[in-house]
Amino acid sequence: MYSKMITPFLAILGLLTNFPTSSFAAPSPVLGIMSHPFNSTHEFIAASYVRWLQMGGARAVRIPFTANSTELDLYVKEMNGVLFMGGGQHLPDSAQYLFEEIVGSYDLEKASTLTPLWGICLGFQWLLQMASEDIHLLSTGFDSENISLPLTFTEAGETSRMYTQNGAIDMVSLLKANNVTMNNHGAGVKPTNFASHETLDDFNLLSTNKDRNGLEFVSSFEHKNFPIYGTQYHPEKSNFEYGSHSPKVDDTPYEAIAHSIEAVRYSFELATLLVAEAAKTGVRFDPASSGLRTIIEKNDGVLLRSEFEESYLFKI
Ligand SMILES: *[C@@H]1O[C@H](CO)[C@@H](O)[C@H](O)[C@H]1NC(C)=O
Ligand SMILES: *[C@@H]1O[C@H](CO)[C@@H](O)[C@H](O)[C@H]1NC(C)=O
Ligand SMILES: *[C@@H]1O[C@H](CO)[C@@H](O)[C@H](O)[C@H]1NC(C)=O
Ligand SMILES: *[C@@H]1O[C@H](CO)[C@@H](O)[C@H](O)[C@H]1NC(C)=O
């Protein structure tokens, strides 16, 4: 009786034809995170980036730092987005290739082709170096390691997708009033350098901050039309890092990472924004036919408290 009534109802809604029949799991986006060199035999990804994407509703695959164009073409085909994490590496050819392939595919008429790119800290710097076509865009000497700051918004920032699109909470007020964005960088982008690069005309500078010496840096940006986003600060840390590291294994946090409700909320909002952008590109990853595997399934060990709470290792 029940099924006789419900079946035509679902069919009218189109649910029976559109919903995947091979699995009861709704398709969830898969984003790539580029791993960084760890030592001569391994690369790594801090687990907090993986968890940040999971918190937003996505899974993550690893993109090797040294991947060649053949491998990267496969990732571009199967991933719904890319996250460039923080760290201390030079901009690799692999990141440049991914950037060119993905940005080159952008077509405003086809929302499903707009694979999002998001950079955090070093990843933010890489995106701006690539977008500005100026590897020397960065300045050094900022005193902004281990400091959580409230954002100073630009006009564009107050109406940006990054800070208004999710809409569930007033992110602008929250981030003005709370010292929750954790900075951990000595290099950065001066707002004057951002403004003087015509190649960045299609990007909006959304917020700035001052380091301990009053030196101003860009703390977030987005592309005016395309899903390219960057934060100099670390949204993934508020939920998933305490700063624990190996010489000090007594659970005492040693970095100025905020874990307040406001900190956890803004982190969640940014993760869900990125994943919502990624979800628009539709299902691209099919584990049954793909050679790719998620990081949770395919890694070569988990390292505890070596700068990060946990890191996934990958044999080179
Ligand atoms: C690199 O680090 C991993 C994890 O600690 C370790 O297993 C491996 O032996 C190291 N490789 C070298 C060459 O030290
Ligand atoms: C790219 O890397 C893969 C995997 O390491 C390798 O099998 C392939 O030969 C490489 N292709 C090129 C063009 O270098
Ligand atoms: C928050 O950051 C501002 C700006 O840097 C600073 O003036 C203030 O003292 C900080 N407040 C706390 C509680 O850390
Ligand atoms: C980070 O800052 C906090 C609070 O300002 C301080 O207690 C802690 O020692 C600092 N940690 C490092 C590694 O500098």
Image: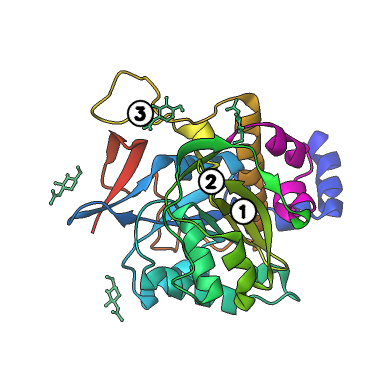
The percent coordinates of residue 286 (x first, y second) are 50, 60
What label sits on residue 233 in the rendered view? 2
Q: Report the residue at 60% width, 43% height from top.
A: 56
Mark 3 secondary-structure assignment: loop
To which quarter of the image does residue 109 belong? Answer: bottom right
To which quarter of the image does residue 61 belong? Answer: bottom left
Residue type pointed to by label 3: Ser
**Front-lying residue, 2 or 223:** 223
Distance from label 3 to label 2 (Cα)?
Answer: 18 Å
Distance from label 3 to label 1 (Cα)?
Answer: 26 Å
Is residue 285 shown in magenta? no
Q: Earlier in the sequence, mark 3 or mark 2?
A: 2
Q: Report the residue at 72% width, 68% height from top.
A: 225
Is residue 178 shown in magenta? yes
Question: Is residue 280 something one can see in this rendering?
Answer: no
| 3 vs 2, front mark | 2
| 3 vs 1, front mark | 1
Question: Is residue 303 something one can see in this rendering?
Answer: yes
The residue singled out by tag 3 in the image is 244
Distance from label 2 to label 1 (Cα)?
Answer: 8 Å
Placement of the N terminus among the 4 image quadrants: top right
Tell whether 20 sits left or right of 38.
right
Mark 2 secondary-structure assignment: loop
What label sits on residue 220 in the rendered view? 1
Placement of the C terminus among the 4 image quadrants: bottom left
Q: Report the residue at 39% width, 31% height from top.
A: 243
Q: Residue furthest front?
A: 213
Please provide the residue range marked out in magenta. 157-181
